Amino acid sequence: MQKGELLYKGKAKSVYKTTDADRYIMLYRNDTSAFDGQKLAQLDRKGKVNNHFNAFIMQQLATAGIATHFEKLLNDTESLVKRLEMIPVECVVRNVAAGSLVRRLGVSEGMELNPPTFEFFLKNDALHDPMINDYHILAFKWASADEIQQMKTLTFKVNTLLKAMFAKAGMVLVDYKLEFGRYRGQVLLGDEFSPDGCRVWDAQSGEKLDKDRFRQDLGNVIEAYEEVARRLGVPLP
Ligand code: TMP
């Protein structure tokens, strides 16, 4: 299996073909983006931290019975994944109010959400990832009713597992975003799970340990990612 041509360059990762038609290589770059690409920076070590972080989480999820595209770490910044046909929606679960929910509904940041909420967003930077619902997904044929149900079930299953894992390590998993794709008729978890796509607060102090440090210019962004990794037991190089 050899690395082939660049297929797609996203805001933080690049995807390469391989000599195996069913496998891609994901390269995690140091590029950091927020507000749909309006704020950009290079953050030292981010690529390797997120690559190792994602590998650890995906392996934990696989052990718990959640099928993912992750196959193996290739080196500090690259992982081998299954080639998915991506479903162009983002699945967001929130345990605590923050971010766009606070802005949209005027609720207080930090309010516990019981039950946790689920939202779909259309993956489209030009349109600023608008919120959509099941009817839009069906009408525009972005996914079938069965796939919608599977995405919801899997996203909540991830919540049960990760909320407990973060709590045990002294952190609150506030919210996160997942993306799914199709592989041989199955819906698999794709993309990544890292502090770039979730909110994590210290359980005691409420200190933000995720990409909000970048969005809000709080400093020590990657140091916070590394702290989350260290507490979860993610082996970093
Ligand atoms: P939001 O509060 O901006 O809607 O984001 C909710 C969570 O989902 C937060 O952890 C960030 C993550 N997210 C992404 O990583 N990328 C996205 O494009 C969106 C809309 C959310």
Image (cartoon, rainbow, N blue to C red):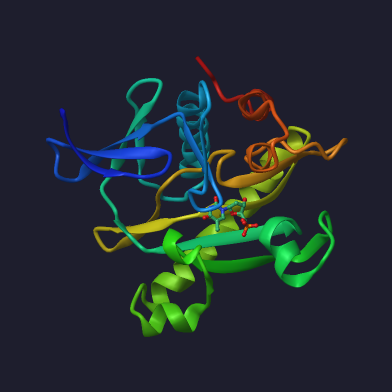
On the question of residue 124 being in view, the answer is no
Q: Residue furthest front?
A: 38
Relative horizontal placement of residue 24, taking residue 42 as reference (left or right): left
Q: Nearer the viewer, residue 45 or 114?
A: 45
Residue 135 vertical placement versus 179 (above, below): below
Count of numbered badges drawn on the protein: 0
Ligand 1 is found in the corner quadrant, namely: bottom right
Give the residue drawn at x 24%, y 58%: 184
The picture quadrant where one finds residue 203 is top right
- Let me know if residue 186 appears in the view: yes
Instruction: List the single residue furthest toward the right.
Output: 204
Image location of residue 65, percent across then percent down:
47, 49
In the rendered image, the quadrant that contains the N terminus is top left
Image location of residue 14, percent across then percent down:
32, 38
Vertical order, 103 against 41 (above or below): below
**Residue 79: x percent and y percent?**
35, 31
- As drawn, 178 above or below 9: below
Indicate whether 183 appears above or below 127.
Answer: above
Left or right of 10 on screen, residue 90: right
Residue 219 drawn at (x, y percent): 70, 29
Image quadrant of residue 93? bottom right
Q: Residue at x 62, y 67 (%)?
A: 118
Where residue 86 sits, quadrant-wise, is bottom left
Determine the residue positioned at 71% across, 69% down.
Answer: 104
